[in-house]
Image (cartoon, rainbow, N blue to C red):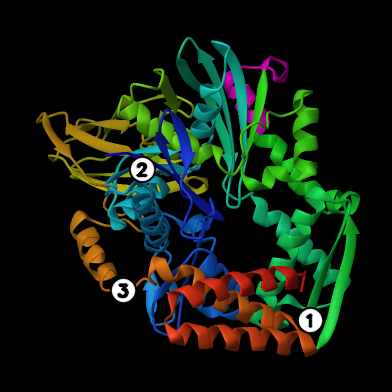
Amino acid sequence: MSIIGIDLGTTNSLVAVWEEGQAKIIPNILNKNLTPSVISVDENNEILVGDVAKERQITHPEYTIANFKRFMGADRKFKLGTYTFTPEELSSFILKRLKEDAESYLGEEVIEAVISVPAYFNDAQRKATKRAGELAGLKVERLISEPTAAAIAYGLHQEDDETQFLVFDLGGGTFDISILELFEGVMEVKSIAGDNFLCGEDFNKVLVEYFIETNKLNLKELDNKEVSALYKQAELCKRELSVKDNAAMILRVDEKTFEIALDRIKFEKLAADLIMRLRHPVERALRDADIHASEIEAVILIGGSTRMPLVRNVVSKMFNKLPYSNINPDESVALGACIQGALKERSSDLKELILTDVSPYTLGVEVANRIEGQKYEAGYFLPIIERNSPVPISKVEQLSTISDNQTKIAIKVYQGESRRVENNIFLGELGIVVPKDKAGMQGVALRYTYDINGLLEVEATILSTERKETLIIEKSPGAMTNEEIKERMLALKDIKIHPRDKTENTLILARGERLYEEALGEKREYIAGLLSEFERILSTQDLRLIEKKAKLISKKFDELETYY
């Protein structure tokens, strides 16, 4: 039974498998490698996944959600029609569809998966991703960082036994940098850096703001459909500027047409601040790895946003070399994830590759520092596992009481680099009961264990009694117990997901509705006629006629596609 590799992306998701001695991307029901990470709810309260849902972003924005991966691990909920979902539940629908695609392709049940996560995902986000897999019916024993997965795909094709390279990952939701070294079958991650609030969507936002400013519009006065259409225009414009020197954006508001035209030079000026932000994590990763830019032998670009010429140019200038582009930036992560799965299975046709990883963040605890005499001030961060420490790793730190007759030690777990915990990310809280005693006489040995999946476990031992307690982080944002996961799995089973085998026909209808709303006049009447014709053919339930008409109308819609 194969272990599949999944790239659960912010914009698109993919699934791959190791088969016949190579990593292969598994196409979805529409024979596409990419499945948009978009969820929608239709008028029958059925869940729509992927391309169909994406088509509804403009026609039914209030019933459609994208970019929810950015909120993984947060206590955030999204209302879609009569349903309310967490980010991991929405992600589980994507994972379930990818699981179905894999099962259809392989002709067997799929149970286990290796799922990728951004290198800079924190503990709560990684745990939420693992829960999403479980809600989708997958056994997820391994999470793999996206840049590391891409590095595996790259390393497999390397003929040199020794090389140092950097993975530059700019996707739809996050920006990650990883520096790795390949030496005699061992791939070692030297350092990781990134920015969880910098991504391809920020470049779209720059174009949207320029459009609004140029046309003297107010974004808050636009309705949901108009905002969705505007962001789609920004995405199309960005893509056009990746292959051409000039592009345009067009939007209709209250039967009035607004537009802008711009070239690559103008776009680069608009995105200057974002380009500067790309440099900081690169410089930090180089410092942490104690490597000079000139020592990097190859730069690998992954994530769809690296297709932008302005991104490729800044990378080339930083390292004085052209980035490696032999692997599709959209597919490399999924390929690497499935290779990791094959390595776990010890596939006989795959040369052994040992992979080491690091902790992307410093993990520590809040402590109170003595300021004078017996006065203490809380809010300080005590690092226990430093960032870029090789994993798996386990470290112990001793804490003690600070007042007489103190019976409880509050252990607040944080992740970050600031000296004050208020500037770091709160992961969870533990309460340890200790015997009454004088200040400083009772203590706890606090053990932090960070595993290969990037998941943190905290264990405490009361020193005076030598009683060891394995404690669960109780207040981790958005956390679910095993019982709650089982309850949600049962609840999600009752929700109808639109049948996979009807995806193509539903997509044609959704696409037609979107084109109809974007068009005017005779073109709109023509589209309405095509939709009516297709709906009539669907009512016959004649599969041969439906398939023939679907191909014809899809071709006509392809011819109609324009910026508007």
Residue 252 image label: 1
Q: Any magenta on residue 292?
A: yes
Front in this rendered view, residue 272 or 200: 200
Residue 97 seen from this side: yes
Q: Residue at x 84, y 70 (%)?
A: 213
Q: Residue at x 48, y 29 (%)?
A: 387
Compared to residue 46, the image places residue 377 above or below, namely: above
Dividing the image into 4 quarters, which one contains the C terminus? bottom right
Say which amino acid is labelled 2. Val
Residue contact between numbered discs 3 and 1, judged by CB atoms under 8 Å: no
| Mark earlier in primary sequence (3, 2) | 2
Residue 495 image label: 3
| Mark earlier in primary sequence (3, 1) | 1
Residue 199 is situated, as x and y percent measured from the top left of the image, at: 64, 50
Compared to residue 531, the image places residue 293 above or below, namely: above
Q: SS class of the residue under badge 3?
A: loop
Please give the range of residues in magenta: 282-296
Res 193 quadrant in image: top right
Circle 2: is it few (<14), some (14-19), or many (20+) Cα within 10 Å? many
Say which amino acid is labelled 1. Arg
What separation in Å lies between label 2 and label 1 (alpha carbons)?
50 Å
Q: SS class of the residue under badge 1?
A: strand
Write down the residue under mark 2. Answer: 413
Q: Image check: 75 left or right of 473?
A: right
Residue 254 seen from this side: no
Front in this rendered view, residue 476 or 545: 545
